[in-house]
Image: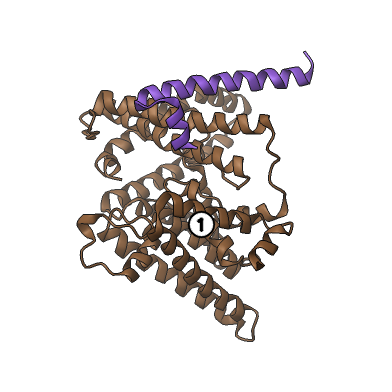
Amino acid sequence: MKSEQKRKSIIAVLFLFIIIKLIVISAMANKDVASLVYEGF
Amino acid sequence: MFVLLQIKQSGRQALRFGILNLVALYVIFGTTSFFTVLCITIAVWSSLFVIKQIKNSAYQRLTSLCGISLIVLLIVFFIIYKKHFDSVVLGQINPAQSQGIDVLFRIVSTISFSYVFIRILDLVRCVTWGQEKLINPIALAGYLAPFHMLIAGPLASYQEHLEMNKSEPPKPTIGHIIRCANTITTGLFFKVVIAQAILITRFGVEGKFEILDWTDACLLFLYLYFDFGGYSLVALGVGRLIGVPTPINFNKPFLSKSVTDFWGRWHVSLGVFIKNNIYWPLQFWMARRVKNPKIAEALSLASMCASFSAVAIWHRVTPRFFIWGVATSIIMLMEKYLQGWLLSKPETTRRWINKSMVVIGPVYTMIIIVLTIWYLSFELANI
Protein backbone atom coordinates (compact mmCIF):
# COMPACT_ATOMS: atom_id res chain seq x y z
CA MET A 1 0.00 0.00 0.00
CA LYS A 2 1.34 3.45 -0.86
CA SER A 3 2.22 5.69 2.06
CA GLU A 4 -0.44 8.28 1.05
CA GLN A 5 -3.15 5.60 0.99
CA LYS A 6 -1.90 4.27 4.32
CA ARG A 7 -2.10 7.75 5.87
CA LYS A 8 -5.64 8.26 4.55
CA SER A 9 -6.83 4.91 5.89
CA ILE A 10 -5.33 5.64 9.33
CA ILE A 11 -7.17 8.99 9.36
CA ALA A 12 -10.43 7.28 8.31
CA VAL A 13 -10.08 4.66 11.08
CA LEU A 14 -9.31 7.35 13.64
CA PHE A 15 -12.33 9.35 12.48
CA LEU A 16 -14.58 6.31 12.88
CA PHE A 17 -13.03 5.65 16.27
CA ILE A 18 -13.73 9.25 17.35
CA ILE A 19 -17.38 8.97 16.31
CA ILE A 20 -17.81 5.71 18.26
CA LYS A 21 -16.21 7.26 21.35
CA LEU A 22 -18.42 10.35 21.09
CA ILE A 23 -21.54 8.17 20.88
CA VAL A 24 -20.50 6.14 23.97
CA ILE A 25 -19.53 9.31 25.89
CA SER A 26 -22.82 11.03 25.04
CA ALA A 27 -24.75 7.93 26.13
CA MET A 28 -22.87 7.88 29.44
CA ALA A 29 -23.27 11.64 29.99
CA ASN A 30 -26.93 11.42 28.95
CA LYS A 31 -26.56 14.12 26.29
CA ASP A 32 -26.84 14.06 22.51
CA VAL A 33 -23.60 14.16 20.49
CA ALA A 34 -24.26 17.65 19.06
CA SER A 35 -24.61 19.31 22.47
CA LEU A 36 -21.62 17.33 23.82
CA VAL A 37 -19.37 18.53 20.99
CA TYR A 38 -20.70 22.09 21.38
CA GLU A 39 -19.98 22.08 25.14
CA GLY A 40 -16.69 20.22 24.87
CA PHE A 41 -15.02 21.93 21.98
CA MET B 1 -2.62 48.74 18.08
CA PHE B 2 0.74 47.92 19.71
CA VAL B 3 -0.51 44.45 20.69
CA LEU B 4 -1.85 43.80 17.17
CA LEU B 5 1.51 44.79 15.65
CA GLN B 6 3.29 42.49 18.10
CA ILE B 7 1.03 39.55 17.19
CA LYS B 8 1.85 39.93 13.50
CA GLN B 9 5.57 39.52 14.10
CA SER B 10 7.08 36.06 13.89
CA GLY B 11 8.29 34.42 17.12
CA ARG B 12 5.34 35.79 19.07
CA GLN B 13 3.47 32.53 19.69
CA ALA B 14 3.57 33.01 23.47
CA LEU B 15 1.89 36.43 23.15
CA ARG B 16 -0.73 35.05 20.73
CA PHE B 17 -1.51 32.23 23.12
CA GLY B 18 -1.53 34.70 26.06
CA ILE B 19 -4.31 36.73 24.40
CA LEU B 20 -6.26 33.60 23.40
CA ASN B 21 -5.85 32.28 26.95
CA LEU B 22 -7.19 35.44 28.59
CA VAL B 23 -10.25 35.35 26.31
CA ALA B 24 -10.75 31.64 27.11
CA LEU B 25 -10.41 32.29 30.87
CA TYR B 26 -12.99 35.07 30.64
CA VAL B 27 -15.44 32.88 28.71
CA ILE B 28 -14.93 29.66 30.72
CA PHE B 29 -14.30 30.89 34.28
CA GLY B 30 -15.83 34.41 34.30
CA THR B 31 -14.80 37.95 35.22
CA THR B 32 -13.45 37.18 38.73
CA SER B 33 -11.00 34.57 37.44
CA PHE B 34 -9.99 36.76 34.50
CA PHE B 35 -9.06 39.73 36.72
CA THR B 36 -7.49 37.46 39.35
CA VAL B 37 -5.15 35.92 36.77
CA LEU B 38 -4.28 39.37 35.41
CA CYS B 39 -3.51 40.77 38.88
CA ILE B 40 -1.42 37.80 39.99
CA THR B 41 0.49 37.78 36.69
CA ILE B 42 1.28 41.49 36.95
CA ALA B 43 2.39 41.03 40.60
CA VAL B 44 4.70 38.12 39.69
CA TRP B 45 5.99 39.87 36.56
CA SER B 46 6.78 43.07 38.52
CA SER B 47 8.68 41.14 41.22
CA LEU B 48 10.72 39.30 38.60
CA PHE B 49 11.32 42.48 36.62
CA VAL B 50 12.88 44.02 39.75
CA ILE B 51 15.01 40.87 40.26
CA LYS B 52 16.13 41.05 36.61
CA GLN B 53 17.16 44.69 37.08
CA ILE B 54 19.12 43.78 40.23
CA LYS B 55 20.76 40.90 38.32
CA ASN B 56 22.00 43.32 35.64
CA SER B 57 23.11 46.02 38.10
CA ALA B 58 26.06 46.52 40.44
CA TYR B 59 24.06 44.80 43.22
CA GLN B 60 24.20 41.45 41.38
CA ARG B 61 25.07 39.53 44.57
CA LEU B 62 21.62 40.38 45.97
CA THR B 63 19.86 38.44 43.16
CA SER B 64 19.88 35.09 44.97
CA LEU B 65 18.69 36.71 48.20
CA CYS B 66 15.75 38.34 46.37
CA GLY B 67 14.90 35.08 44.55
CA ILE B 68 14.99 33.04 47.78
CA SER B 69 12.90 35.68 49.62
CA LEU B 70 10.28 35.56 46.87
CA ILE B 71 10.18 31.74 46.97
CA VAL B 72 9.88 31.70 50.78
CA LEU B 73 7.04 34.25 50.59
CA LEU B 74 5.25 32.13 47.98
CA ILE B 75 5.65 28.95 50.06
CA VAL B 76 4.30 30.70 53.18
CA PHE B 77 1.25 31.91 51.20
CA PHE B 78 0.79 28.44 49.76
CA ILE B 79 0.88 26.62 53.10
CA ILE B 80 -1.37 29.14 54.92
CA TYR B 81 -4.07 29.13 52.26
CA LYS B 82 -3.78 25.38 51.55
CA LYS B 83 -4.19 24.70 55.28
CA HIS B 84 -7.36 26.78 55.60
CA PHE B 85 -9.09 26.81 52.24
CA ASP B 86 -9.77 23.71 50.16
CA SER B 87 -11.40 25.04 47.05
CA VAL B 88 -9.76 28.29 46.01
CA VAL B 89 -9.79 28.34 42.22
CA LEU B 90 -8.68 31.57 40.57
CA GLY B 91 -10.26 33.89 43.12
CA GLN B 92 -13.45 31.85 43.39
CA ILE B 93 -13.86 30.59 46.95
CA ASN B 94 -16.24 27.97 48.30
CA PRO B 95 -19.37 29.98 49.34
CA ALA B 96 -19.26 28.43 52.82
CA GLN B 97 -15.78 29.90 53.37
CA SER B 98 -16.15 33.18 51.52
CA GLN B 99 -17.81 35.33 54.21
CA GLY B 100 -15.71 38.35 55.12
CA ILE B 101 -13.14 37.57 52.40
CA ASP B 102 -11.83 40.67 50.63
CA VAL B 103 -10.63 41.20 47.08
CA LEU B 104 -6.94 41.12 47.98
CA PHE B 105 -7.38 37.76 49.66
CA ARG B 106 -9.06 36.36 46.56
CA ILE B 107 -6.16 37.49 44.39
CA VAL B 108 -3.45 36.21 46.71
CA SER B 109 -5.36 32.96 47.21
CA THR B 110 -4.70 32.14 43.56
CA ILE B 111 -1.13 31.37 44.59
CA SER B 112 -2.45 28.48 46.64
CA PHE B 113 -3.97 26.94 43.52
CA SER B 114 -1.47 24.09 43.21
CA TYR B 115 -0.63 24.24 39.50
CA VAL B 116 -0.30 28.04 39.40
CA PHE B 117 1.98 27.88 42.46
CA ILE B 118 4.28 25.33 40.84
CA ARG B 119 4.50 27.31 37.60
CA ILE B 120 5.40 30.47 39.54
CA LEU B 121 8.21 28.60 41.35
CA ASP B 122 9.62 27.28 38.06
CA LEU B 123 9.42 30.77 36.57
CA VAL B 124 11.25 32.33 39.55
CA ARG B 125 14.03 29.73 39.32
CA CYS B 126 14.47 30.12 35.55
CA VAL B 127 14.51 33.94 35.61
CA THR B 128 16.56 34.40 38.81
CA TRP B 129 19.21 31.71 38.40
CA GLY B 130 18.82 30.72 34.74
CA GLN B 131 19.37 32.60 31.49
CA GLU B 132 15.71 32.60 30.40
CA LYS B 133 14.20 35.95 29.49
CA LEU B 134 11.11 37.35 31.18
CA ILE B 135 8.20 37.51 28.71
CA ASN B 136 5.58 40.27 28.82
CA PRO B 137 2.66 39.99 31.32
CA ILE B 138 0.03 38.98 28.72
CA ALA B 139 2.20 36.15 27.40
CA LEU B 140 3.12 35.27 30.98
CA ALA B 141 -0.56 34.83 31.91
CA GLY B 142 -0.64 32.12 29.22
CA TYR B 143 2.16 30.30 31.03
CA LEU B 144 0.92 30.75 34.61
CA ALA B 145 -2.75 29.91 34.05
CA PRO B 146 -3.21 28.14 30.69
CA PHE B 147 -6.95 27.44 30.37
CA HIS B 148 -6.50 23.86 29.11
CA MET B 149 -3.99 22.82 31.80
CA LEU B 150 -5.51 24.72 34.71
CA ILE B 151 -7.61 22.18 36.58
CA ALA B 152 -5.43 19.08 36.53
CA GLY B 153 -2.17 19.90 34.71
CA PRO B 154 0.05 18.75 33.11
CA LEU B 155 2.84 21.16 34.00
CA ALA B 156 4.89 22.57 31.16
CA SER B 157 8.18 24.07 32.32
CA TYR B 158 8.93 27.74 31.62
CA GLN B 159 11.73 26.68 29.26
CA GLU B 160 9.29 24.52 27.27
CA HIS B 161 6.83 27.40 27.10
CA LEU B 162 9.50 29.73 25.70
CA GLU B 163 10.31 27.14 23.02
CA MET B 164 6.94 28.04 21.52
CA ASN B 165 8.39 31.32 20.25
CA LYS B 166 11.07 29.49 18.26
CA SER B 167 8.70 27.61 15.95
CA GLU B 168 5.57 28.34 13.98
CA PRO B 169 2.32 26.65 15.13
CA PRO B 170 1.42 23.37 13.33
CA LYS B 171 -0.50 23.79 10.10
CA PRO B 172 -4.14 22.78 10.58
CA THR B 173 -4.18 19.74 8.27
CA ILE B 174 -7.03 17.26 8.50
CA GLY B 175 -4.63 14.56 9.74
CA HIS B 176 -3.39 16.81 12.57
CA ILE B 177 -6.92 17.81 13.62
CA ILE B 178 -8.11 14.19 13.57
CA ARG B 179 -5.14 13.04 15.69
CA CYS B 180 -5.79 15.81 18.24
CA ALA B 181 -9.54 15.03 18.27
CA ASN B 182 -8.64 11.37 18.85
CA THR B 183 -6.51 12.29 21.89
CA ILE B 184 -9.26 14.58 23.25
CA THR B 185 -12.02 11.99 22.81
CA THR B 186 -9.84 9.25 24.33
CA GLY B 187 -9.34 11.52 27.35
CA LEU B 188 -13.08 12.18 27.57
CA PHE B 189 -13.74 8.44 27.23
CA PHE B 190 -11.32 7.70 30.11
CA LYS B 191 -12.90 10.37 32.29
CA VAL B 192 -16.61 10.20 31.45
CA VAL B 193 -17.00 6.51 30.65
CA ILE B 194 -14.35 4.36 32.39
CA ALA B 195 -13.65 6.46 35.53
CA GLN B 196 -17.33 7.23 35.95
CA ALA B 197 -18.27 3.55 35.53
CA ILE B 198 -15.75 2.54 38.25
CA LEU B 199 -17.05 5.31 40.51
CA ILE B 200 -20.73 4.45 40.09
CA THR B 201 -20.26 0.67 40.19
CA ARG B 202 -18.16 0.53 43.36
CA PHE B 203 -18.56 3.83 45.19
CA GLY B 204 -22.16 4.76 44.27
CA VAL B 205 -23.67 7.70 42.41
CA GLU B 206 -22.55 10.18 45.10
CA GLY B 207 -18.99 8.85 44.86
CA LYS B 208 -18.22 8.27 48.56
CA PHE B 209 -14.79 6.67 48.68
CA GLU B 210 -14.99 4.08 51.46
CA ILE B 211 -11.91 1.88 51.27
CA LEU B 212 -12.73 -1.31 53.15
CA ASP B 213 -10.18 -3.73 51.69
CA TRP B 214 -7.39 -4.02 49.09
CA THR B 215 -9.82 -4.50 46.18
CA ASP B 216 -11.30 -1.05 46.95
CA ALA B 217 -7.76 0.37 46.96
CA CYS B 218 -7.15 -1.25 43.52
CA LEU B 219 -10.38 0.27 42.17
CA LEU B 220 -9.48 3.69 43.59
CA PHE B 221 -6.09 3.40 41.88
CA LEU B 222 -7.77 2.56 38.54
CA TYR B 223 -10.28 5.39 39.07
CA LEU B 224 -7.46 7.88 39.77
CA TYR B 225 -5.61 6.76 36.64
CA PHE B 226 -8.60 7.06 34.29
CA ASP B 227 -9.86 10.28 35.86
CA PHE B 228 -6.53 12.09 36.04
CA GLY B 229 -5.15 10.45 32.88
CA GLY B 230 -8.34 11.42 31.06
CA TYR B 231 -8.01 15.08 32.07
CA SER B 232 -4.36 15.03 31.00
CA LEU B 233 -5.16 13.54 27.58
CA VAL B 234 -7.84 16.20 26.94
CA ALA B 235 -5.28 18.90 27.85
CA LEU B 236 -2.66 17.22 25.62
CA GLY B 237 -5.04 17.10 22.65
CA VAL B 238 -6.13 20.74 23.07
CA GLY B 239 -2.51 21.85 23.54
CA ARG B 240 -1.36 20.08 20.37
CA LEU B 241 -4.33 21.47 18.46
CA ILE B 242 -3.46 25.09 19.28
CA GLY B 243 0.32 24.55 19.21
CA VAL B 244 1.06 25.09 22.91
CA PRO B 245 3.74 22.91 24.59
CA THR B 246 1.77 20.41 26.67
CA PRO B 247 3.80 17.51 28.09
CA ILE B 248 2.66 13.88 28.36
CA ASN B 249 1.59 13.15 31.94
CA PHE B 250 1.16 9.36 32.01
CA ASN B 251 3.50 6.96 30.25
CA LYS B 252 2.07 3.44 30.70
CA PRO B 253 2.46 3.38 34.52
CA PHE B 254 1.07 -0.18 34.79
CA LEU B 255 4.19 -1.54 33.04
CA SER B 256 6.58 -0.11 35.67
CA LYS B 257 9.22 -2.56 36.88
CA SER B 258 9.92 -0.73 40.13
CA VAL B 259 8.55 2.07 42.32
CA THR B 260 11.30 4.36 40.95
CA ASP B 261 10.18 3.48 37.42
CA PHE B 262 6.54 4.08 38.40
CA TRP B 263 7.20 7.64 39.58
CA GLY B 264 8.92 8.31 36.25
CA ARG B 265 5.72 7.29 34.44
CA TRP B 266 2.94 8.60 36.73
CA HIS B 267 2.31 12.39 36.69
CA VAL B 268 5.51 12.75 34.65
CA SER B 269 5.36 16.55 34.43
CA LEU B 270 5.29 16.96 38.23
CA GLY B 271 8.23 14.54 38.49
CA VAL B 272 10.22 16.64 36.00
CA PHE B 273 9.40 19.80 37.95
CA ILE B 274 10.51 18.22 41.26
CA LYS B 275 13.76 16.96 39.67
CA ASN B 276 14.56 20.35 38.10
CA ASN B 277 13.57 22.53 41.03
CA ILE B 278 14.28 20.49 44.17
CA TYR B 279 16.22 17.24 43.63
CA TRP B 280 19.03 18.35 41.28
CA PRO B 281 19.61 21.82 42.83
CA LEU B 282 19.91 20.15 46.28
CA GLN B 283 22.21 17.44 44.90
CA PHE B 284 24.49 19.94 43.15
CA TRP B 285 24.55 22.20 46.20
CA MET B 286 25.59 19.27 48.42
CA ALA B 287 28.05 17.80 45.90
CA ARG B 288 29.98 21.08 45.92
CA ARG B 289 30.28 21.06 49.72
CA VAL B 290 30.59 17.39 50.75
CA LYS B 291 33.63 15.38 49.70
CA ASN B 292 33.13 12.27 51.88
CA PRO B 293 31.24 9.67 49.72
CA LYS B 294 29.43 8.11 52.73
CA ILE B 295 28.07 11.47 53.87
CA ALA B 296 27.17 12.24 50.24
CA GLU B 297 25.09 9.02 50.10
CA ALA B 298 23.25 9.96 53.28
CA LEU B 299 22.60 13.41 51.87
CA SER B 300 21.30 11.81 48.67
CA LEU B 301 18.59 10.19 50.82
CA ALA B 302 17.94 13.61 52.39
CA SER B 303 17.40 15.27 48.99
CA MET B 304 15.12 12.41 47.88
CA CYS B 305 13.14 12.74 51.14
CA ALA B 306 12.93 16.50 50.61
CA SER B 307 11.65 15.99 47.04
CA PHE B 308 8.94 13.50 48.02
CA SER B 309 7.97 15.52 51.09
CA ALA B 310 7.48 18.48 48.78
CA VAL B 311 5.26 16.35 46.52
CA ALA B 312 3.30 15.21 49.57
CA ILE B 313 2.81 18.73 50.97
CA TRP B 314 1.86 20.00 47.51
CA HIS B 315 -1.01 17.49 47.48
CA ARG B 316 -2.14 18.25 51.03
CA VAL B 317 -0.49 19.57 54.20
CA THR B 318 -1.14 16.55 56.46
CA PRO B 319 1.13 14.24 58.52
CA ARG B 320 -0.14 11.17 56.61
CA PHE B 321 0.98 12.59 53.26
CA PHE B 322 4.31 13.57 54.80
CA ILE B 323 4.89 10.01 56.11
CA TRP B 324 3.98 8.67 52.64
CA GLY B 325 6.61 10.99 51.10
CA VAL B 326 9.37 9.83 53.43
CA ALA B 327 8.41 6.12 53.08
CA THR B 328 8.38 6.34 49.26
CA SER B 329 11.82 7.93 49.18
CA ILE B 330 13.19 5.17 51.46
CA ILE B 331 11.74 2.49 49.13
CA MET B 332 13.32 4.21 46.13
CA LEU B 333 16.68 4.40 47.88
CA MET B 334 16.49 0.68 48.70
CA GLU B 335 15.82 -0.03 45.03
CA LYS B 336 18.86 2.06 44.15
CA TYR B 337 21.04 -0.03 46.49
CA LEU B 338 19.57 -3.25 45.05
CA GLN B 339 20.48 -2.07 41.56
CA GLY B 340 24.04 -1.40 42.75
CA TRP B 341 24.19 -4.88 44.32
CA LEU B 342 22.90 -6.39 41.08
CA LEU B 343 25.69 -4.74 39.09
CA SER B 344 28.27 -6.50 41.29
CA LYS B 345 26.88 -9.93 40.29
CA PRO B 346 28.15 -12.07 37.37
CA GLU B 347 26.69 -11.50 33.88
CA THR B 348 24.56 -14.72 33.86
CA THR B 349 22.96 -13.97 37.27
CA ARG B 350 22.21 -10.42 36.17
CA ARG B 351 20.55 -11.61 32.98
CA TRP B 352 18.46 -14.16 34.89
CA ILE B 353 17.32 -11.55 37.46
CA ASN B 354 16.52 -9.01 34.71
CA LYS B 355 14.37 -11.58 32.87
CA SER B 356 12.43 -12.50 36.00
CA MET B 357 11.92 -8.80 36.83
CA VAL B 358 9.86 -8.40 33.62
CA VAL B 359 7.11 -10.39 35.41
CA ILE B 360 7.91 -9.82 39.09
CA GLY B 361 8.63 -6.06 38.70
CA PRO B 362 5.12 -4.86 37.69
CA VAL B 363 3.48 -7.15 40.31
CA TYR B 364 5.80 -5.85 43.08
CA THR B 365 5.23 -2.24 41.98
CA MET B 366 1.45 -2.58 41.89
CA ILE B 367 1.43 -4.17 45.37
CA ILE B 368 3.44 -1.26 46.81
CA ILE B 369 1.33 1.37 45.01
CA VAL B 370 -1.98 -0.24 46.06
CA LEU B 371 -0.72 -0.39 49.66
CA THR B 372 0.24 3.29 49.60
CA ILE B 373 -3.14 4.16 48.07
CA TRP B 374 -4.82 2.18 50.83
CA TYR B 375 -2.80 4.16 53.40
CA LEU B 376 -3.67 7.46 51.70
CA SER B 377 -7.23 6.57 50.72
CA PHE B 378 -8.90 9.05 53.08
CA GLU B 379 -6.69 11.89 51.86
CA LEU B 380 -7.02 10.95 48.16
CA ALA B 381 -10.79 10.74 48.39
CA ASN B 382 -10.90 14.35 49.54
CA ILE B 383 -8.48 15.89 47.04
**Letter of the brown chain:** B
* Residue B373 spot, x, y in % from top left: 32, 37
Q: How is the image coloured?
A: by chain
Q: Is residue B373 above or below residue B103?
A: above
Q: Is residue B84 above or below residue A14?
A: below
- Chain A representation colour: purple
* Residue B211 spot, x, y in % from top left: 23, 32
Q: Quadrant of residue A24?
A: top left
Q: Is residue B93 above or below residue B74?
A: above
Q: Quadrant of the C terminus of chain B?
A: top left
Label 1 belongs to which residue?
A: B22
Q: What residue type is disc 1 on?
A: Leu
Foreground: B118 or B32? Answer: B32
Q: Residue at x 29, y 31 (%)?
A: B217
Q: Residue at x 79, y 16 (%)?
A: A2
The local crowd at label 1, few if under 14, some if 14 to 19, many if 20 or more residues have their Cα within 10 Å, is many
Foreground: B147 or B198? Answer: B147
* Residue B97 spot, x, y in % from top left: 22, 59
Q: Residue at x 73, y 59 (%)?
A: B9
